[in-house]
Amino acid sequence: MKLIANDLAVDRGGRLIFRGLSFTLASGEGLLLTGPNGAGKTTLLRTIAGFLRAAEGEIRLEGADAEHALAEQCHYVGHLNGIKASQTVAENLSFWAAYLGAIGGGGMGSLPLDEALERLSLKSLRDIPAGYLSAGQKRRLGLARLLVAARPIWLLDEPTVSLDAASQAVLAAMVRDHIEAGGLAIAATHLPLGLDFARELTLGRGGRATP
Amino acid sequence: MSPFLALVRRDLALAFREGGAVGTTLGFYLMVVTMLPLGLGPDLNLLSRIAPGVLWVALLLAALLSLDRIFLNDYEEGALEVMALGPMPLELVAAAKSLAHWISTGIPLALITPALGLLLNLDIDAYGVLVLTMLAGTPAISFIGAIGGALTLGLRRGGLLLSLLVLPLYVPTLIFGISSVNAVLMGPGGFAASFLILCALSLASLVLAPIAAAAAIRMQLQ
């Protein structure tokens, strides 16, 4: 499976965010997006996820399950966690598992609910309404979604926000496992995730990108 | 479980749990209908004559209050984003959420109408037909309302704008809902025609409104 971006240009509200951006990412590779605030990291991730339309260029997926569109094969973790405060941790997660289902193949499988909770140390909070969780715990619950519904492509926008050191290590291990299982991951982050991403893409001001 | 059913079940569970959303809607309906006789005085003939119209309009207003529930919370919490990447197209997401809104709002409102009809001295012949027309007409209210809910997602205090956008679209449902009740009360004939048009309005909105709502959501998620 190969994710290919070709000569991509995106503008928002008439302002050019970046142009001439090209990269290729194959199965089992991770791409780290870096760059100052406003360089277009989130914009790039949201363009891949299909929320934004590219003004020029294209993004395509080669060698993937043709039945599912690119957006369907992505997990997008943004600034919000998508959690219902009045539902318990387990209810939140089991809804996402039932709704999203598993797409993909190879070594990427979905974990059962309890294993996913265990992995993110949320097991003891299983039956607590998610509204009572701390910011870091909410974040972990949001990330647990990635484990219960398999997707080949993970798009992570500042995934470490409000996570403590131990949880950051868990996240890093999750991403590593995903990549080793043949998945793709693109992460925008200011903190080193403790990951040896194959590639780094630095978005600069003025819409230039240096691979 | 299919994603569609999973989404409907979740929205229903939330509607009956989160801040008594269903209860407030029913309470508002009850309040509007109780206030009216206080304002108009105890003229039973007058009340009885205007009861079907009052109940329909009060139902529309009560339903209107709950429309922002369809998408707003999920939008603010980021769940709508995740749903957009899910296995269903956004049109089906909008349809599932509108359906859940109808089950949690339209049906309860229609079902408590007989109790409120008592307050307005509603003609005994009208009870059955009024509930029937409301059950047939409320799907249009939920599905058309979802368009307004989706269009006003990005706005602060979008509630008032939502009402302005959506209420005119409810006019056909209101007209044919009341005219089918009046056809039964004042006879002779005419019920079938009005009622069938009411059903047609609901069916058309079932199909067309999710497309419009999904387009609005796509725009909001940009």
Image (cartoon, coloured by chain):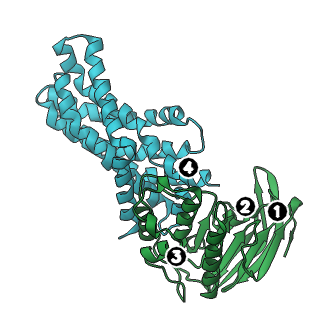
The answer to which of A164 and B39 lies nearer the viewer is: A164
| Chain letter corresponding to the colour cyan | B
Q: Secondary structure at mark 1?
A: strand
Q: Would residue B211 be seen by someone viewing this image from the given angle?
A: no
* Mark 2: amino acid: Thr
Nearer mark to the viewer, of 4 and 3: 3
Q: Secondary structure at mark 4?
A: helix
**Lateral position of residue B110 relative to residue B76, left or right:** left
* Position of residue B47 measured from the top left corner of the image (x, y, whole percent): 21, 18
Residue drawn at point x = 20 percent, y = 11 percent: B42
Q: Check if mark 4 and mark 3 are on a common chain.
A: no
* Mark 3: amino acid: Arg
In the rendered image, which residue does mark 1 sit on? Answer: A18
- Chain to which the residue tagged by mark 1 belongs: A
The reply to whether discs 1 and 4 touch (Cβ–Cβ < 8 Å) is: no
Q: Check if mark 1 and mark 2 are on a common chain.
A: yes
Q: Secondary structure at mark 3?
A: helix
**Lateral position of residue B171 relative to residue A109, left or right:** left
**Lateral position of residue B95 relative to residue A47, left or right:** left
Label of residue A43 in the image: 2
